[in-house]
Amino acid sequence: MQDLIGFPNVAGITIALSKGRILNETLPLLEAAGIVPRDDPHSSRKLILATSRPDLRLVIVRASDVPTYVEHGAADLGVAGRDVLVEHGGAGLYQPLDLRIGVCRMMVAVPAGFDYASAVHRGARLRVATKYVVAAREHFAAKGVHVDLIKLYGSMELAPLTGLADAIVDLVSTGNTLKANNLVAVEEVMPVSSRLIVNQAALKLRRAEIQPLLKALAEAVAGQG
Ligand code: PRT
Ligand code: MG
């Protein structure tokens, strides 16, 4: 079969992934499903990677762009964290499988010594810096906490240390980053893991191609340690 690399997605299956932990943790699942990139994705600078399956390619995009590629059908499938999916809104996406990778928690964190509970109890208005404004807005609204959200694109931990915000909403896995910046987690917003996402139209129109892949990945997830 002819190589599909570089061609629009007229045939075959395209999977969108982001470099870093999602790629690292997805590769073993893909391998268990019989899919291995032809070039080493860690050293290659290619953004489209051919695989051991001639009808299946990987595209490398920013983590927060994965749902956009899949929503618009530029990729048929993708892997994205729940954090990213909540901010995107999930329109046009089917989320059939929790891959149980990229596991962490979205937390509210404040400087050590800041009495969050009593600030909330007093009804104080808190300035909260975060990349996750949709999740944060829903969380504080549900708790009846008054907040002014400040949108950031990274290094949230710096915001309380510089006086930009009273609190942050960020992802925490080991807790080392919070600790190193003298912050403490005070409340969970949501548990996070990465999901397989599928373009809804692609699943309907090309179920025969996509369904076996979903099944193979579900088995890979069930078999992972
Ligand atoms: O880095 P870039 O701006 O390109 O994009 P990104 O940060 O969205 O991508 P990436 O690769 O860093 O993260 C991809 C996905 O991994 C996220 O969308 C999450 O679903 C998932 N994930 C799992 C995490 C973490 N764990 C995590 N700990 N993403 C980020 N972190 C960061 C966190 O924001 C904080 O800065 O790691 C730091 C905390 O880690 P600990 O171990 O010190 O607690
Ligand atoms: Mg990052």
Image (cartoon, helix red, strand yellow):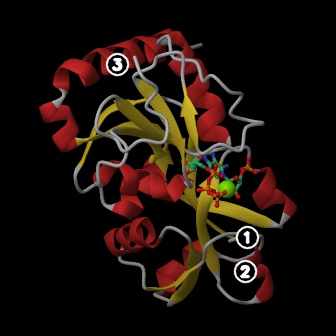
From the top left corner, tell me how far across and down residue 19 is, in percent. 64, 44
The residue identified by callout 3 is: 213
The residue identified by callout 2 is: 160
From the top left corner, tell me how far across and down residue 8 is, in percent. 36, 45
Judge the density around disc 2: few (<14), some (14-19), many (≥20) Cα neighbours within 10 Å. many
Q: SS class of the residue under badge 1? A: loop
13 lies above or below 147: above
The quadrant of the rendering that contains the C terminus is top right
**102 left or right of 115 in image:** left
The quarter of the displayed image where residue 199 is located: top left
- For this rendering, which residue is in front, 187 or 78? 78
Amino acid identity at mark 2: Pro
Q: SS class of the residue under badge 3? A: helix
**79 left or right of 88 in image:** right
The quarter of the displayed image where residue 222 is located: top left
Task: Kindly tell me whether mark 1's CB lies below 8 Å from ligand 1.
Answer: yes
- In the rendered structure, are the residues bearing label 1 and label 2 in contact, judged by CB atoms less than 8 Å apart? yes
Q: Residue at x 40, y 63 (%)?
A: 87
Judged by depth in the image, the label closer to the viewer, 1 or 3, is 3
The residue identified by callout 1 is: 157
Q: Residue at x 71, y 77 (%)?
A: 114
Task: Kindly tell me whether mark 3's CB lies below 8 Å from ligand 1.
Answer: no
- In the rendered structure, are the residues bearing label 1 and label 3 in contact, judged by CB atoms less than 8 Å apart? no
